[in-house]
Amino acid sequence: MTITMHWHDWLALLAQYLMLSMLSVSGAITTVPDMHRYLVDQHGWLTEAQFTSSVAIAQAAPGPNVLFVGLMGWNVGLNAGGGIGAGPHAWLLGLFGLAVTMVGIMVPSTTLTYFATRWGHRNRERREVRAFKQGMAPVVVGLLIATGWVLAAGNVTAGVPAWRLWLLTAVTALIVWRTRVHLLWLLGAGALLGAFGLV
Amino acid sequence: MQLLAPDAATATDRPRPRSPRDLFVSFTWLALQGFGGVLAIVQREVVEKKKWLTPEEFLEDWAVAQVLPGPNVINLSVMIGDRYFGVRGAAAALAGMLTVPLVVILALAVLYAHFAGNPQVAGALRGMGAVAAGLIAATGIKLIPALRRLPLGFGLSLAIVAVVLAAIAWLRIPLGWVLIVVGGVACGETWRRLRPVKGPAP
């Protein structure tokens, strides 16, 4: 896929991630539905497949899951440069996109954490602090389930019956909920099922 | 109930990171062990093996890291680094968490792009995507029982979960509005219910 990114598009992308950083209560993963709305639905900067593969690769790879944000930026940059086969120019744009999204998602939240930590630690018994912490809990739970839903819906492609993918997502959720199986086994099983064309 | 006060004898000479470089190497190492999430690894390495934090300190830090926006383990690494070496420590821990894992993930992405046309590889990633969606949904489902202990009560909490799910997953309302409106109502109502009790109830 090839897209055109003007400098104001990059700025808009940066601004969007700076904002999402401040909204990412309980982790960047809860802002995935909004990233999907912005990148795929609204601007068409990423394909559905690039979006879900960014999240899936980050889940399968070691390291904090927030790195999926960098992969989204990398893919936007590659698309702007004419795809991964277009040579060094596209790779540089990919790295630029990675830097834009990672800086956006990291800087506001990390700065806030740095300055708020001592205050929050000292004031953890205060009513406002407890009200925020305990009031946001059900919102965070709703966001996590919504994220699973949006990702599952994004997986559905032509060629494979949608119900099989939904079933795999539902069975995975059930296994993770009820057992302590290591996540790598589940990701491996999903990869095998997909490679054999079963989902 | 037993209060776990820190032991005065061990508080002074207990293990701590030797330098920002030690923080960088330690966080790089634990990030590289964390497939599908790093939190469990942080707890095992920092609390159980290195003993930089007691379990109680870890829980308190974790609660604060969770309240603040941003990835929880990233926030936690900034907090731990800051405690020992100030801004240099925070930067070292953060860099450790991100640098090498970013290189690894880019290598994987390039490898994947190379083989993306292959139907088996595309299928494998589709399968992993379906699993990843289930993992994240299950993380939310597992937290539902903890909602019983909130000041909001279980029924109201479940209603909030349903409203957020509907607004984000089906109505596709921008996250900011959902957080401001639903989050605002939830925090406001919690604040009201946390009102300190003055004297016996009538």
Image (cartoon, coloured by chain):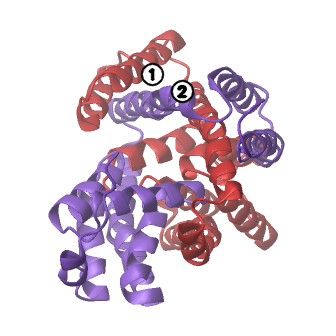
Amino acid identity at mark 2: Ala
Rendered purple, the chain in question is B
Q: Which residue is mark 1?
A: A169
In the picture provided, is B126 more to the left or to the right than A42?
left
Check whether the beta carbons of the residues at disc 2 and disc 1 lie within 8 A of each other.
Answer: yes
Residue B71 shows up from this direction = no
Query: Which image quarter is the N terminus of chain B in?
Result: top left
Query: Which image quarter is the C terminus of chain B in?
Result: top right
In the picture provided, is B17 more to the left or to the right than B124?
left
* CA distance separating discs 2 and 1: 7 Å
Q: Is residue A136 above or below residue B70?
A: above
Residue A143 drawn at (x, y percent):
62, 37
- Quarter location, residue A111: bottom right
Rendered red, the chain in question is A
Identify which residue is drawn at 81% across, 70% down.
Answer: A8
Q: Which residue is mark 2?
A: A152
Q: Nearer the viewer, residue A114 or A74?
A: A114
Amino acid identity at mark 1: Thr
Q: Nearer the viewer, residue B28 or A95?
A: B28
Q: Is residue A137 above or below residue A100?
A: above
- Quarter location, residue B168: top right
Q: Dot 1 lies on which element?
A: helix
Density class for disc 1 (Cα within 10 Å; few <14, some 14-19, many ≥20) is many
Identify which residue is drawn at 43% across, 65% down.
Answer: B76
Identify which residue is drawn at 72% across, 41% down.
Answer: B190
Q: Is residue B55 above or below residue B103?
A: above
